[in-house]
Amino acid sequence: MPGFGGILSIARSALTTSQAAVQIASHNIANANTPGYSRQREVLSEGTPENTPAGIFGTGVSLVNVQRQRDSMLDQEYRLSNGQAGAAGMRSDYLQRVENVFAEPSDNGLSNALDKFYNAWSDLSSDPNNPSARTAVQQAGSTLAQTFNGIASQLSSLKSEAVDRARSTVGDINRMASQISELNGRIVATESGGGTASDLRDQRDVLLDTMSKSASVRVIEHTDGSVQVMLGTISLVDGIGAKQVQLTNTTTMDFNVVGSPDKIRSVGGELGALQDVYNTDIAGVEQGVDALANAVITDVNTLHRTGWSPAAGAAGNWNAALGPTGSNVDFFDSAAASGNAAHMQLSAAVQADAQAIAAGTAQNETGDNSLALSMSGLRDNAPSAANTNFAADFRTLVGGIAGHLNEAKNSSTVYTTLTSQSEQRRTAVFGVSVDEELIQIMRQQQAYAAASKIVKTVDEMMQTLLSLKQ
């Protein structure tokens, strides 16, 4: 039969659950601005009914669990777009800096250096016996070579910086992997007796969100509460075990897990973007610049060898009896590192004496400007150019960079927007609304007051019962 004890037990359960609900709502309000915090809700259940001869009576309410509000599918969607946004943003940043290396259009760019080089030869053709005109050609050639050197040096610096940044990112990933594995252990231990380790799970999700920007991660949750983290094609974290990633070499940027020779495929995120920038984008630009420098060296030297260099005299392959075969003097050094942009320089003969520069093709012919005219003609038609002339080749190279940069910027905008939208959708699930929590507190306050009235009513009933014995 129901009695005062049963009623008081029901009231007690109502009071304790209301207190717990107010504490949970207070915890939510306190962490309303805490990054990564997931709002929590009490999970209540009816007490086990009591079967009596008079019928089945309820026994109140019980607090089953404190559950955080989270949607794993929304988390997965966010992390995917976050990694894509990180990759596009990183690539866009580096491509912008590659474009800035060329400083076009400007007075210090390669286009201007080429124009000054052609103009100097044109001026020499107007006055082939003027020593100052030869000196101007020497200086213009040196400036052109130095411009190529500067571009190559800046591209090399960008690659070195990308390596340093990749090493730093790898360090961050390894640190987060270790922290995630540690949290896995704590969560499993805490939840083994039942309940949800909400705050520990929030800490782990913050790490996973951060890692998702650094690299492409996929999270698989196990039934014991731990997670497995897939990085590209490898399992980085599984339960309390965490592997370490390393940068394997800097010839081509590759990554593997310590102890495994296999490369990590589909790295993704900022780390994957650094890999693409290093191995493809900057490397491709370097190849283009080297090809252009080599073409300039080849065509200029091919012409210059056929000319008469006063300082060389009858040296080289000059033979008046066989015709104007030239003094065989290189304008640019053809042996320096196979003619790449980084090592481009004037030949030793031209560096030593501007009089080694040829203006014509006839030995000791005063006023011969034929070679200078041919050199200035490279402005419009260069045999080794892929697009008729070097200026067109350079425009193609810079245009390609601009196209890739525009593509990366568009991708960055798209994925950043998708990430923002994903964040809004999942925040609607786990975010804290202070107004909603205040309403929850007011509701629980009313429930607590009602439960208190039950206790008061039972007390009055007991007093009435006791008064009957007097």
Image (cartoon, rainbow, N blue to C red):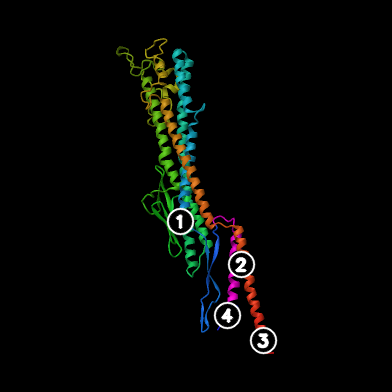
Label 1 – label 4 distance at C-alpha: 44 Å
Residue corresponding to mark 3: 466
User: Which region of the structure is painted magenta?
Assistant: 10-36
Residue corresponding to mark 2: 444
Q: Which mark is residue 6?
A: 4
- Identify which residue is drawn at 48% across, 41% down: 161
Q: Mark 1, mark 3: which one is toward the viewer?
A: 3
Picture coordinates of residue 300 (x, y %)? 39, 22
In the rendered image, residue 19 lying in the magenta stretch gets the answer yes
Picture coordinates of residue 257 (x, y %)? 40, 53
Q: Looking at numbered disc 3 in the image, what kind of residue is underneath it?
A: Leu
Residue corresponding to mark 1: 73
Q: First in sequence: mark 1 or mark 4?
A: 4
Q: Quick one: SS at disc 2?
A: helix
Q: Nearer the viewer, residue 28 or 216?
A: 28
437 lies left or right of 325:
right
Q: First in sequence: mark 1 or mark 3?
A: 1
**Quadrant of the rendered structure where residue 121 is?**
top left
Q: Looking at numbered disc 1 in the image, what kind of residue is underneath it?
A: Met
Label 4 – label 3 distance at C-alpha: 18 Å
**Contact (CB < 8 A) between labels 1 and 2?**
no
Q: Nearer the viewer, residue 375 or 43?
A: 43
Picture coordinates of residue 128 (x, y %)? 44, 13
Label 1 – label 2 distance at C-alpha: 31 Å
Label 3 – label 2 distance at C-alpha: 33 Å
Q: Which image quarter holds the N terminus?
A: bottom right
Q: Looking at numbered disc 4 in the image, what kind of residue is underneath it?
A: Gly
Picture coordinates of residue 90 (x, y %)? 48, 43
On the question of residue 127 being in view, the answer is: no
